[in-house]
Amino acid sequence: MKNRVIDHPVLDSIDEQKTISFTYDGKEYKGLPHESIAAALLANGIRTLRKHEESGTPRGIYCNIGHCFECRVTVNGQQGVRACLTRVSEGMNVASGEKLLTSVKDWRPEND
Amino acid sequence: MTDILIIGAGPAGLSAAITIAEHGLNVHVIDEYMDAGGRLLGQLYEEPNGNWWNGIKESNKLAEKASNLGVKISLNTSVNNIEKIDDKWVVYTDTNTYSTSHLLLATGAAEEPFPIPGWTLPGVMSVGAAQVMTNVQRVKPGERGVIIGVNVLSSAIAMELNLAKIDVATIALPKINQITEESGNPENVLNSLLHVAHMAPSAFVKFGSKLMKNDFMKKLGITFFPKGGVKMWGIPIQLRKAVIEIYGEERVEGVKMATISPTGEVIPGTEENISADFVCIAGGLYPLAELAAVAGCPFHLIEELGGYVPLHNNRMETTLDGLYVAGNITGIEGAKVAISQGVTAGLSIVHNSGKQKLDQEIAASIQAIEKTREEAYIQFHPDVKEGKKKLQQYWEAHKSSKQLVQS
């Protein structure tokens, strides 16, 4: 839990005993019940939440308050969920966004 | 149907809801975040009297008070659109559609980014993102960060990161370009920095800021600004160095900085690499006014208020019937001003719902806003009063042109 700010000189300390389990891209992780998916992942050292749909470059959180839509993930099969606005919960199944085949470009390998 | 609908559960929205509920009307607050409080949640600073302003506690107090008065608060609810149908405002959310005669927009502010090469790398975030991660989510944005952009917001958040024992290697300017013209110019930045000088425990900044109150001294200050920066809370603030690039393969590994001239020009051959695992971009705040735009409010660009603001009067009424604004959508200021504005908006709504004899109370609440503004500890824009005066003039002009059309 070294990535968490457990004790704070001004704020109350947080309870790290009660953890919940969730999966990200099939791997199991522990989170705390108060936190967002983005925070739970960052606490586990995960910064990349998706690949840009077209370029495939990695993306993580940018604004952390729902404005930028950079942290979109799939939650229990529902696409386009903002990881910064959604609380992580027991048994949650989170998947990162991947590069897509675009209909705009000719995506055959020889044209990649 | 709910009597009154409020979009935004921040300090302005909640205090408006409390005021309205206290007068016995039904009120429903919608917000897309998972906790009530808005940006107030992340705030943490020590006031001159030695008390800490703890945004989480203040948010909880407001939310609890509202709930106890019967205010319904729907969190995790995003508003997609609003429109006027007949004499009702219709609000479309991702779960329900609501209609109301009185709609308050308390949507707050958003952060202005400035694009820099490498800014899409994971680990690059807005400075407010780092604040929410640290103070609200209680997860470190990283071990060692660089903040790009020197202003009131970034200075305050740097201090908050420091409190949580997160290392901020430096606060520096962005390389000057068309977008960063203001924020990349050391003279402009020094000018705005003078307004946070009172927050710095460093005698140098405090002393220096008094010396630099005229233009000549300011130029001198920039020319002789120490190469190692000035330290605020132990963090070097650089006004003679700019970040020209964020580097890293799959994530942030550091930034490339260079020395700049007093007007912001990069001096070739001075580039150096600073290692970091997170980078914050701090471009300042602007009023988040999309919904007012969608509704059809007239707008004015008022730099002193942080950008385009919907035209409104001091009773927080817009030019559209039944549409009100409060908080940072009306200009960038602190949470306490937002709370005061919420009270006025709430009273106006109660008054316009048919309750008589509120004029005196409304007048007193408008005075309370101004008093709060004058006593504000953190001022985001030094000339906010000037901006409010301009807005008032625009309102008068609008009113008289309307009367002209009607007569």
Image (cartoon, coloured by chain):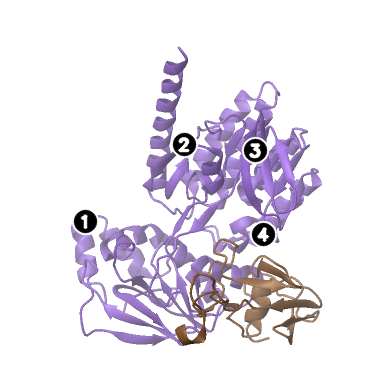
Chain colours: A brown, B purple
Judging from the image, what secondary structure is the residue with disc 4 in? loop
Same subunit, tags 1 and 2: yes
Residue that badge 1 annotates: B215
Is B47 situated above or below B371? below
Give the chain letter at badge 1. Answer: B
Rounded to the nearest whole Å, what is the CA distance between mark 1 and mark 3? 46 Å
Rounded to the nearest whole Å, what is the CA distance between mark 3 and mark 4? 19 Å
- The amino acid at mark 3 is Leu
Residue that badge 2 annotates: B298
Residue density around tag 4, few if under 14, some if 14–19, many if 20 or more, within 10 Å: many
Residue density around tag 1, few if under 14, some if 14–19, many if 20 or more, within 10 Å: few
Rounded to the nearest whole Å, what is the CA distance between mark 2 and mark 4? 28 Å
Residue that badge 4 annotates: B33
Closer to the observer: label 1 or label 4?
Answer: 4
- The amino acid at mark 4 is Tyr
- Outermost residue on the top side: it is B407
Give the chain letter at badge 3. Answer: B
Mark 1 touches mark 2? (CB < 8 Å): no
Rounded to the nearest whole Å, what is the CA distance between mark 1 and mark 2? 36 Å
Taking the image as drawn, is residue A6 in sight? no
